[in-house]
Image (cartoon, helix red, strand yellow):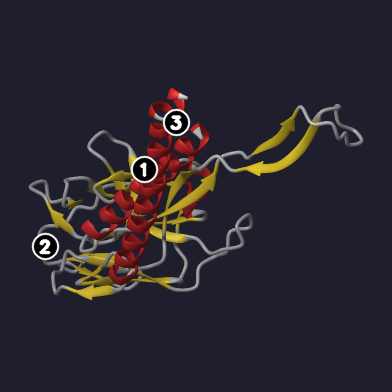
Amino acid sequence: MLRGFYTAAAGMIAQQRRQEMLSNNIANMNTPGYKADQTSLRTFPTMLLQQMGGTEGVAGQKAGQRPIGNLATGVYVQEAVPNFVQGDLQETGVGTDLAILQGSLPVDRQTGKPGSLFYTIETKDGETRYTKNGHFTVDTANQLVTAEGNIVLDEKGNPISVSSENFTVSPDGTIFDQGRKAGRIGVSLISNPMDLVKEGDGLFRLTQPGSAAVYTGTGFQVKQGFIERSNVDAEQAMTDMMSAYRSFEANQKVLQAYDRSMEKAANEVGRI
């Protein structure tokens, strides 16, 4: 019976964490470039139960043991994996808003799937990060930066300097400022997006540096005056939240049933 307590409690914890992840997805539904998280549930290792003290023996087993079957010991949230499917493009009319429209991209040899394109960012700590959020602005140093003040890099890894927000961007990412070429925005191809880890503020950290490279091919377009919306499906997220709530409630009722049984065992059976 004590195993039942742990199994039901593990199910409640897993559904609670799933609910928190879904709530975070819905909260970021209007965040440009946000990638929805998906949970992966996995069972704990199963246990093989055997009856002890029996008289029937089975070949290859000790006398007095008879297998009963496997017992699952609960589930847990193994990991939260971002969904890197491209979100819809929304027109804003703001010249500093940029969106990457992906087309045909090279396929990764290991995964057999095409990679994904990201803007290359330098944080205030001087570290390289990647983002899908193209809601940019121009700071007091006339550099193209994110809303949080991180520097947007060009294809050579240098900051992009412009005289004002009145610049134009060609479909290949080249920036023209007052008739001169100010550089080409750094678009990096991540061959396996699953190597990316979320760090907040729309930034991703690459765990395998060798899987990123500046992309100069023709499999994309930079759309000025657009942003990429989040890929959160609000209807599906609400349905999944209801499902997680019902599963949590079912495990809770199982836990309460075990608690009542233990109460009877301690208060009533113990008197006999």
Frontmost of labels 2 and 1 is 1
What is the crowding at mark 1: few (fewer than 14 residues within 10 Å), some, or many (at least 20)?
Answer: some
Q: Is residue 83 left or right of residue 54?
A: left
Q: Is residue 174 left or right of residue 43?
A: left
Q: Counting residues from the N terminus, which is met first, the one under dot 2 or under dot 1?
A: 2
What is the crowding at mark 3: few (fewer than 14 residues within 10 Å), some, or many (at least 20)?
Answer: few
Rendering coords of residue 1 (x, y %) = 51, 35
Which numbered dot is residue 256? 1
Rendering coords of residue 19 (x, y %) = 32, 52
Tell me whether circle 3 and circle 2 mark residues in contact (CB < 8 Å).
Answer: no
Q: Counting residues from the N terminus, which is met first, the one under dot 3 or under dot 1?
A: 1
Residue at image position (13%, 69%) is 94
Which numbered dot is residue 165? 2
Name of the residue lying farthest toward the right: 59
Q: Secondary structure at mark 2?
A: loop
Rendering coords of residue 72 (x, y %) = 58, 43
Q: Disc 3 marks which amino acid?
A: Ala
Name of the residue lying farthest toward the front: 272
Which numbered dot is residue 265? 3
Whether residue 36 is visible, yes or no, is: no
Tell me whether circle 2 and circle 1 mark residues in contact (CB < 8 Å).
Answer: no
Nearer to me, 195 or 12: 12
Name of the residue lying farthest toward the top: 271
Residue at image position (79%, 36%) is 66
Q: Disc 2 marks which amino acid?
A: Glu
Q: Is residue 145 above or below residue 84?
A: above
